[in-house]
Image (cartoon, rainbow, N blue to C red):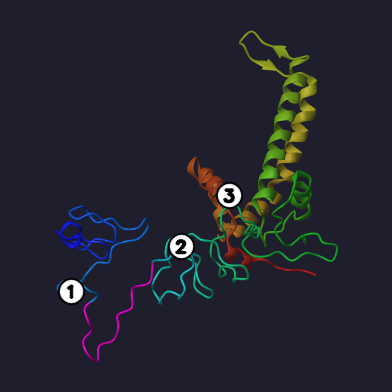
């Protein structure tokens, strides 16, 4: 036998494997390389393209998470999650407006915690101030204190025109109630000293009681007119007719109705009762 009969194949392919591979063993490829996939019906390479056809480009890889897309989204299409909106596009719901954006239109609610304009209390109609910055006597004084209210009560002794604020009215009511309570306690103490008690249970007050009777009489008669005038002006501030003050003469319910009306706030229509003076 010759060497050609006993020797095996040397070099070249045997069974389709790479060079130096034993026959019958699984093909082994170099580390890191991938075997070429043959297209169906072909062993040498990819299938030939048809004449006149365009080569098909592979699809681009998807953008990484958080990366800005290369092309801006179409109108109505939202940007991918985590990507920044392109220049000129509106931010998504809940995101902050970009720097330099116009503020919210007038009348819209300010964001929580943002400083807004302080609304002034609405006192029916604005009251003009005098040259010295004080409220004119003919106008209602909505910020009157107890001293100012009592002073205006006597200054407008018989003035039935114009308006009176709730502060003017109720400060005077409180001062009058305190005054009558103090005089009542004083008259009781003064009348107890030197009083005379009769067998039938009746008694006469002491001599110190009668000066208080004179004070009560003067106070009652001297404040009837300003009390009526103040009540009429208070009803004017509520934009009601001053004649409703006559309900006080109706027993029981009349005084209750006037009390409720005096609690109402000012109305813009009450300005029709003002009589401005220089």
Question: Splitting the image into 4 quarters, where does residue 164 fall?
Answer: bottom right
Label 3 element class: helix
- For this orientation, the residue located farthest to the front is 1
Along the line of sight, which residue is nearer the eye, 124 or 101? 101
Q: Which mark is residue 42?
A: 1
- Residue in the image at 79% along x and 45% along y: 147
Taking the image as shown, residue 9 lies to the left or right of residue 88, namely left
| Image location of residue 182, percent across then percent down | 74, 29
Mark 2 crowd level (few <14, some 14–19, many ≥20, 10 Å Cα): few
Q: Taken as a whole, is the magenta stretch helix, strand or loop?
A: loop
Mark closest to the chain's N terminus, 2 or 1: 1
Marks 2 & 1, CB-CB < 8 Å contact: no
| Image location of residue 206, percent across then percent down | 77, 18
Decide: is 51 above or below 257: below
| Image location of residue 219, percent across then percent down | 74, 40
1 vs 3, front mark: 1
Q: Label 3 belongs to which residue?
A: 262
Quadrant occupied by the N terminus? bottom left
Mark 3 crowd level (few <14, some 14–19, many ≥20, 10 Å Cα): many
Q: What residue range appears in magenta?
A: 47-61
Label 1 element class: loop
Mark closest to the chain's N terminus, 1 or 3: 1
Q: Which mark is residue 93?
A: 2
Q: Is 22 included in the stretch rendered in magenta? A: no
Label 2 element class: loop
């Amino acid at each position: 036998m010759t060497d050609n009969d006993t020797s095996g194949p040397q070099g070249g392919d045997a069974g389709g494997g790479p060079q130096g591979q034993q026959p019958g063993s699984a093909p082994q490829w170099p580390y890191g390389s991938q075997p070429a996939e043959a297209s169906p019906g072909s062993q040498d390479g990819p299938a030939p393209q048809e004449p006149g056809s365009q080569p098909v480009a592979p699809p681009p890889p998807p953008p990484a998470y958080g990366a800005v897309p290369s092309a801006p989204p179409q109108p109505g299409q939202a940007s991918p999650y985590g990507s920044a909106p392109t220049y000129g596009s509106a931010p998504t719901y809940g995101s902050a407006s970009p720097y330099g954006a116009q503020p919210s239109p007038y009348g819209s609610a300010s964001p929580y915690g943002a400083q807004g304009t302080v609304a002034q209390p609405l006192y029916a109609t604005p009251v003009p101030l005098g040259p010295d910055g004080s409220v004119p006597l003919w106008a209602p004084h909505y910020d009157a204190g107890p001293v100012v209210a009592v002073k205006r009560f006597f200054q407008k002794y018989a003035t039935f025109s114009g308006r009176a604020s709730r502060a003017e009215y109720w400060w005077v009511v409180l001062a009058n109630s305190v005054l009558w309570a103090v005089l009542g306690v004083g008259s009781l103490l003064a009348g107890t000293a030197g009083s005379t008690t009769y067998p039938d249970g009746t008694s006469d007050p002491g001599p110190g009681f009668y000066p208080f009777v004179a004070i009560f009489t003067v106070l009652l008669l001297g404040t009837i007119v300003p009390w009526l005038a103040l009540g009429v002006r208070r009803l004017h501030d509520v934009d009601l007719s001053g004649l409703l003050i006559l309900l006080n003469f109706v027993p029981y319910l009349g005084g209750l109705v006037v009390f409720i009306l005096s609690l109402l706030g000012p109305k813009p229509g009450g300005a029709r009762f003002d009589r401005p003076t220089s």
